Amino acid sequence: MSLHEDWVRQIDAELDGELTLAERAALARHLAGCPACAGARASHLELRVALARSAGEPHARAVPRPRIRGRMVLLWVALSLLAGAAGGWLAHARWGGPGQGSLEASRAAFVVE
Ligand SMILES: [Zn+2]
């Protein structure tokens, strides 16, 4: 873990509005002398702009929360994967595996139940 990684974490915290004034001052001083971290801050900001655009708020002043958003997306992906696996397993148990009846038929059966 390098010192710059610590600063990049501070950059994220700053963009989330979680830093004190003193911490922001220290970060600003480091950025002034460190092109690598200054570049990282720029790309973090651009990432948030892209997130705000995708959220339908291209002119948002507040910073979107990619960490929360990311977790929600992961949660949904995990849930849909689980649901898909469970559905496939149920279908397999009930109808003896794929091939017996179309997907539409399975869907209809689920709706009826
Ligand atoms: Zn740096």
Image: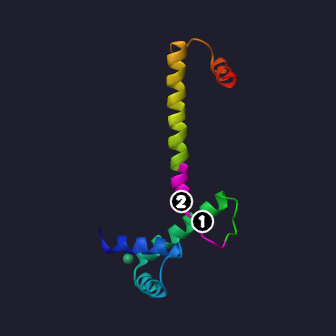
Q: Cβ of disc 1 within 8 Å of ligand 1?
A: no
Q: How many marks?
A: 2
- The residue that label 2 is drawn on is 68
Spot occupied by residue 102 in the image (x, y as percentages of width and height): 63, 16
Residue 104 in which image quadrant: top right
Residue drawn at x 42%, y 86% as measured from the top left: 26
Secondary-structure class at tag 1: loop
Query: Which quadrant of the rendered structure holds the N terminus?
Result: bottom left
Direction from residue 32 to residue 68 in the image, left or right: right
- The magenta-colored residue range is 61-73
Spot occupied by residue 113 in the image (x, y as percentages of width and height): 66, 23
Q: Which amino acid does label 2 sit on?
A: Ile
Q: 26 above or below 6?
A: below
Whether residue 98 is visible here, answered yes or no, is: no
- The residue that label 1 is drawn on is 64
Q: Which amino acid does label 1 sit on?
A: Pro
Residue 54 in which image quadrant: bottom right
